[in-house]
Amino acid sequence: MNIPVKRTAYILGSILIIAYAFQIIYSNYQANIELRNRSLQRAYTDFFDKYSSVKTYLKERQKDFQDLASDRTISTYFQNKAMGMTMMYGLAISLNNVKQRLISFQTTNNLGKHTLFPKIIFLDKNKPCVTVLADNLVDQITYDKDALIDSHKTSMQHDTTNPEYLIISTPCILKDKIVGHLIGWMSYGLFFDHFFQTSKAVEHVILLTGKTRNTPVCNSSDSNPINSEDIRGLLNRKEQTYTNPDDGTTFLIFSVNCDQTPFDAVKFISCIEIFGTDDPEKLLIRMVSICSLIFIFTVMLIRLNVKQQIGAIQLADAEERRRKIEQKNKELEIARKKEADANIKLQASQKEIESQNERLREMDRLKSEFLANMSHEIRTPMNGVIGMTDLLLKTELNEKQRRYVEVVNTSGQSLLTIINDILDFSKIEAKKLDLAHIAFDLLDVVEDLFLTLAFQAHEKGLELVMDMSPDMPLLLRGDPARLGQILTNLVGNAIKFTHMGEVVLYIDLTSESDNTAILRFRVKDTGIGIPLDRQEKMFDHFTQVDTSHTRQYGGTGLGLAISKQLSEMMGGEIGLISEEGKGSEFWFTVHLEKQERQDNNNARQSSELSGMRLLLVDDNDSSRKSFMRQMQSWNMQVSETSNGFDAIRMLYKALADNAPFQIALIDKDMPGLNGEALGRAIKAETRLTHLKMVVLNCSRAELNFEHFQKIGFNAFLAKPFKRSDLKNTLIKHLS
């Protein structure tokens, strides 16, 4: 009675299994069809997206050309020409600047290792003025000038004279008038190789150009399975299959009309590359066969006594699991005993370590106390040695004796600096360093520091600039010596590790109350920078960027560690921002008490300077910003420029506006038209004889002021200078 019931259940189960298998087969068939359709859509989308990126790339190059046409250098040339300058008087310099700007544009616009624009022509009123060629390029590229410059907007054309080139032309505009053109040639082959070249034998890309867009100019493969007649016939189709009569390979062809560009694109790719070799119908037959085999195997399996076999297997598995559980329990008990023993040993080790740490801390304290006492004892005779060598240098010595004494003096100064660092570090470690609490003027502290470090900066040709916020409270209470020590360490390090460029000290007011102020100091340089993996350790004791810097630049590696501890003792913090090879910015904050009587920058202004018109000519951006902020706080009307040519134009414009400048601050060393040449040009103009001129120089020793007086300069200031010197000089010559 039970046997038929069991057989019926087995048969129903097998039918359900077969039905489920057929459902899977049909789903796989539909999925295969869907994958083929998606592959086709993806191939077309990838092709269209690639050429969309080409169009975007060419639009960006057009935008670069537009920006170049409106570049300040080109605008300056046409402005100078409009003002009446000739090649003999200044216009040749502007034209040379245009050429240098075109060369810079050409060298910085590359595609891979090749120049993007091998030839650029600058036209002035349709006449070629400047031609820039890439390296090793012979100027054999001809062109139809009338066809190129007819357009009043940026255009992209196919070069009919040189089919392998694409031309970008853009007008130069001055006061809404076209005064010239820029024309650049771009090789089809260069950007085609970059964007479209492929190593696949089953994939080819062709660019078509010309007036009717049927002339092939680039092909991604040496072997082209489609002749030019067939390509022309495919331009008006979205997609089409093509069979190569030579080998019977079937290709799927896409064509795209690249609007806003002078070319169309055609791509053909093997159908096997997209769809693969599997046919959905064959796959369906194979899956049905497999399902039939599964059905036969199922019918055979239901005749076996599955229940007895499963029961035996389950019994064996249960026995095995019981044995493993007992084994695991034994291992767990052993592990617990080992863990208890390890905990006892760990507690004993921790007690021993704590005892050793206590002994080390006591030894470290005794060491620091010893170093503090000994450094003081050593510094006293060192001061005597340095003082005696200073006195000896003031006596009459021959050259050899003076050289020996100078070496002794320099070595003593270096040794004294190291001893002072060790003494300060030891006092801090021994907690014997107390901060003073006295009244001081912040501006005096910073300006005296800059005058002390100016010689080191000028010896290396560096610009040393201080930029202070105009709302800064200047009369404070604290320890000016320790504040100056931090600034000396940071600014001195910036000068030491900067070989060209500038070192700028920014002083900002972070916050203030009626009685206190939090100041933020930032020392920014253009030096060697610090690797990212070394920045966290820069404020550790005896730390430098690497050992080679210790040999090259000297130092103990204590300056930053001392600065960190001093800033923290003043209620602040310290940090850095740096990029290797581009420079560093060290910053710190201090919490200082304000004096009851405050005399800010606005209180220091002079009514005698209010409303005076001043022209500042300096090629250093940081220096100009600092001067501008200070003189504007004196209510002066200040205009600034970075070069002499712009200064001359501003002077003439001020005369035309009946608002002439009364005094000019002119930097001596500027590229192009330097301070001396600018002064001569100003004094040569009779309408500018009223203008007072002050020359700015980085070193008093380098300036022959009598020479500049003969030119017409009224005074000079050596940078960096005190603000009081600047104000007194302006008042003297404007009163």
Image (cartoon, rainbow, N blue to C red):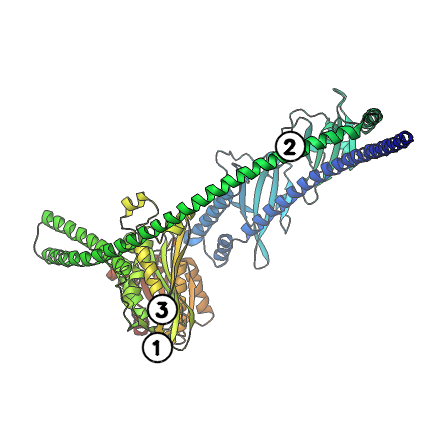
Quadrant of the rendering where the C terminus is positioned: bottom left
Question: Mark 2 or mark 1, which is nearer to you?
Answer: 2
Nearest to the observer: residue 59 or residue 462: 462
For the question of whether residue 618 can be seen, the reply is: no
The mark nearer the N terminus, 2 or 3, is 2
Q: Residues within 10 Å of mark 1 (few under 14, many from 20)?
A: some
Q: Residue 20: x and y, percent? A: 83, 35
Q: Which residue is mark 3?
A: 691
Identify which residue is drawn at 32% across, 70% down. Answer: 442
- Give the structural element (helix, strand or loop) at label 3: loop
Q: Amino acid at mark 3?
A: Leu
Kindly report the distance in space between the C-alpha atoms of the residues bearing marks 2 and 3.
107 Å
Which class describes the residues within 10 Å of circle 2: few (<14), some (14-19), or many (20+)? few
Label 2 sits on a secondary structure element that is helix
Identify the mark nearer the N-term, 2 or 1: 2
331 shown above or below 670 = above
Whole-percent x and y of residue 640? 42, 64
Q: Nearer the viewer, residue 46 or 327?
A: 327
Marks 2 and 3: CB-CB under 8 Å?
A: no
Above or below: residue 217 compared with residue 358 = above
**Residue that label 2 marks:** 320
How far across and down, in percent of the image, does residue 688 sit? 37, 67
Q: Secondary structure at mark 1?
A: loop
Q: Is residue 586 found left or right of 130 in the rendered image?
A: left
- Tell whether 397 sits left or right of 259: left
| Whole-number angstrom distance, CA of label 3 to CA of label 1 | 33 Å
651 vs 320, nearest the viewer:
320
Q: Which mark is residue 599?
A: 1
Amino acid type, callout 1: Asp
Residue 624 shows up from this direction: yes
